[in-house]
Every structure is written in structure tokens, then in C-alpha cells.
Image (cartoon, rainbow, N blue to C red):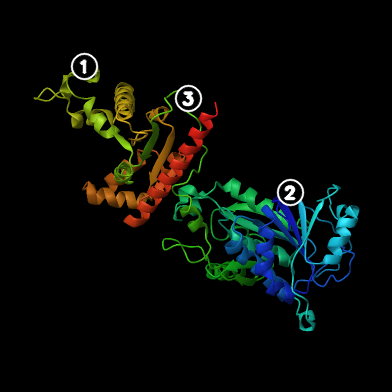
Amino acid sequence: MVFIMYKTGLLILTRPLPVLKSAVQSVLEEAATVVSNTLYVHIQPSSSSHTFKIRNVPCSKDFRCLMTQLYSSSASLCNNLDVRILLNNVSNLQLERNLKFDLKRPCDIVLIDNQLIADEFQNKSESLASLMKDGSRGPTEVHTLSMPADSQSSMIEDDKVESFDNVVLGGTFDRLHAGHKIMLSEACFLAERQITVGVTDENMNQKKTLCELITPTEKRIEGVLDFLQDIKPCIEHKVVAINDMFGPTISDPDLQFIVVSEETKRGGEIVNEERQKKGFTVLKQHVIELVVDSCHNQYEEEKISSSSSRKRLLGTVINPIKPNRNIPSSPYVIGLTGGIASGKSALCGRLEKLGAGTVDCDKLGHEVYLKGTPCYSTLVEQFGNEIVGKNGEIQRRVLGSIVFSNPEKLHLLNRIVWPEIGKLAEDKIKKHAENGKEIVVLEAALLLDAGWNNLVHEVWTSVVPPGEAVKRMMDRNNMTEEEANKRLKSQLSNKERVQSSNVVLCTLWEYEYTQTQVEKAWSLLQKRLIERNSEHSKY
């Protein structure tokens, strides 16, 4: 029994494909008790000899089925593992090369379903080292899997699947999950020479759920390339950003085959219609079935999807928290920001019910204009007596009409007002500390614009899609659609806020789901504070 966890493992499966298909669950469960991060899988059925050598395996329906089963099962059985099925030896061509394991990550342990080969690896470490392309001595640990005995019926061979020189597919590929891996692996499985992948750019992703949380295009391209180069380095990989549904499919006449999902099947048909117009060869097509997400909740999709993955990020730390040594360690201050109509105030109220002290910078903004405050005389001096009403107070509507049409005057107003609001906020935070509050939420739409994030330990942002924000402004503030859009565009975008935030929340869905996010964020915050206090107590 192995008790030590290894970071990266190489799982070698040598039993007949029907046997392996029936043992997927037990194999993955056992592997998950040994390997913690990356699990490479090499499938070489019917290797009965006690001497192991990587050899060519033809494309077959059974191999494809096992590959899909391993990925889909890994999503529910060992979601913590990055499973990567190696396909360098899978080809319908007669390969005449010395195949070796070409792994991007150093392998710590080999798991194998054949006791004779396991004994060979353990007794002759050089035999395992000889299989590694990088020339390293290879993993020193070998673990034999518990497997059922083969039956005669399991030795039946099945039909081969046709392969192609050039295979293409496209998608968002945000945070690679099992569904993505099945599509990419299917393309590599069928490709003999080149695989072309189109990765949607930011403009194509605007209507996707929580698009603000989608990884930047260049990072998604890097992730796809890393995966492809790992599983089948012997072919050429062409991964490009695309700004429409076609990408390279209507510009490259040499493409032969396209991999699509059930959702994008119609898109594949439209691609072929365009290729026919250009006189290109019609692409043969393979449709990947959607993979059921056995772990989804009522607010997530039933299939494994990037949208659900992004929803699971809500309330968690998405960007590292940098210590702010310019403010007291207690109380712990959360800066809560977001665009107009994003639900900040409602979130702040929920956090207050959970025990946080709250500071509303919008209300403080009204206070700094009052007669007798430091700002009052400065504002009158800079903008004239015309901004003063009959009651002696500054008329904010009149002042607004002056500054919002003049960027220089708006900048001047902000230079006067923002520092004073910041001072009032600091005073409020101190009062909460005196009253024993351990956590204070500073609610401010202009948190980042005004630099008040230097008053907080973490920045949390509330987001809703622009269309939803416009709808709320029209309903709540009686604005026209044009007025609402203009107001929205005058602020930082969701993406800009998210980039500067540690935690993101979204109030788009049901009350209960928003509450779930808040409670999750609060619980994780409590854990971070316990860990921080524990660290401080050591010194």
C-alpha cells in the first residue's frame, strides 16, 4: 500500500481495451490515492510480455471510447487531477521511430496494471529510464494496480477508425475541463500531421456567462498549446485566436476533418456551406457528446462547462491578496465596489447581517459638501457662488452640470472631494474598531478611481452584465436607455474592476444564489483571518 502522495504520475494501461473500459472507475480511484496533481495515461492494450516497449496503436472505436470514458469519469471521481492521455503512439500509419515518453512535467511514480512489467521496472531502473525522452533516469517508484483477470472475450479486436492529416476544431477553452480535453484529444487522436485550433477572442465572449472572469485569450492559447504538446508532441500544433465562428476553416483548403460538440454541430454545417462556396473540400465531422456534470448544483449547467467553473469562482479569491502594511491589521477592511446598479448596497447589507461593520462612501460624499466642512469653501472658491443655493448649501445638480461637460473641472472636483471622503471613511473605520468590529466593509463605487483601495486589505467587486445594469437603471432611476448607457460607459468596466479585485460576486441570479455567494465569501474570509492570525502568533 502506498501512503505517500506524488505530484505527477504516469499510468500505463496494458490490458485489452474491453477490460480497461470496465475498470476505469477503480483505476482512477486508486490513482487518486497516489497522485495529487498531474496524471499521464499511456494506453497500450494487450502488452502481455514482461518486457515493455512503447509501440504503435491504431485508431479504434474501443480506444476512442476508453479515452472519453477516462476523461468524463475523472471529472467526477478525481476532479483534482489533471488527467492527460498520451497519444504519441496512436496512429494508423506504420511508425518507424523509437517512441519514448515526452512529458512536460517530471514524473514521480509509475502506476501499471501488469505485475510482470512492474517487476521489471523495479528490478531494472534503467529499463524505465530508457523510455524517457529527456534522458533522465525516470521515476524510481512503481505501483501495481489492482485489476480483474482478463477473459477470453476481452481479446476481441474492433474496427479501426479513419485518421486524417489535418484536423480542426474551435472553442473558448477557458480553464480546460474534461469536455475540452475530450474534444482536443479526439482531434489529436485522429490527426496524423497537424491539428488546428481556433480560440475565441474577447469580443466573441462578451455574451458568455461571467465573461469578466474568462482567462485572457493569450493565456487560453498557452493552455491549449501546453495540453496538445503534452499529449501528442509528434504532430504540428497551430493554435490561433479567432474573431468569428469560422476562423481558419474557411481560409485553409487543406483541412479535412472537424471536431464539434452537440451544441456546435450546426456551426460545423455552416462552415461546410462556406467551404463549398469557396470550392474547398467538405470537412468530415465527428460530434462529441456533452459530458454530464455529476457535481453541478441547481444554479449550474447539467453538462461540464466553463460557465459553471466560473460560477464556482464567485466568492473565492481569484487574484492574490497583497498585504497592506500602511493600515492597521485590525479591523480587517474589505473594499466593496462595482458599477452602478450592480447590487453593491444589497451585498453590503448581507455582509452587515453576517457581522461586518459598514461604511457607505456615497453617504460620506454627501457630507463633504455641507456648509462648514473643509470642502465647502474650497468648492465655492473654485466653482463660484452660482453653485450655492438659497439655503446656503451647495447645489450638487448645478455643480454637476458644470463638471460633467468639462473633464478638467471634473478632475478638479475629484481632487478636492475624494481625499476628504477618504478621511471621513478612515474615521468611520476607527469608530467601528472602537466598537469591537473585527471586519469592516467599505462600500464605494469609486473605490479604485479614488484610490481608496489603499484603505483596505481586500477588494471585492460586484458585477452584472451591462445589459442588466442598463435595465435596472431604467427601472430604478427612470432613465432612458441612452442615459443609462452613457452613465455606464462613463465608469470603469467590469473587466477593469475584476482585474484589480481579490473576490468577485454577481447579483444577476436569484436572491438565494446571491446569498450563497456571500456566505461562501464570508466563510472563506473567516478561514483566511484564522490562518493570518495563526501566522502572526508565531512571531
Q: Earlier in the sequence, mark 3 or mark 1?
A: 3
The CA distance from mark 3 to mark 1 is 34 Å
Q: Nearer the viewer, residue 266 or 214?
A: 214
Q: What amino acid is at disc 1?
A: Ser
Q: Position of residue 457 (x, y in %)?
A: 44, 32
Quarter of the image that includes the C terminus? top right
Q: Say above or below: 361 vs 419.
A: below
Label 2 crowd bin: few (<14), some (14–19), many (20+), radius 10 Å:
few
Image quadrant of residue 429? top left
Give the labeled residue for mark 2.
105
SS label for mark 3: loop
In the rendered image, is residue 378 in sight?
A: yes
Q: Say above or below: 407 vs 294.
A: above
Label 1 crowd bin: few (<14), some (14–19), many (20+), radius 10 Å:
some
In the rendered image, is residue 179 in sight?
A: no
Give the labeled residue for mark 3.
325
SS label for mark 2: loop
Q: Horizontally, is 199 left or right of 523 in the view?
A: right
Q: Position of residue 311 (x, y in %)?
A: 46, 54
Q: What amino acid is at disc 2?
A: Arg
Image quadrant of residue 255? bottom right
Q: Earlier in the sequence, mark 3 or mark 2?
A: 2
The CA distance from mark 2 to mark 1 is 65 Å
The CA distance from mark 3 to mark 2 is 37 Å
Give the labeled residue for mark 1.
377
Q: Say above or below: 318 vs 382.
A: below
- Closer to the observer: label 3 or label 1? 3
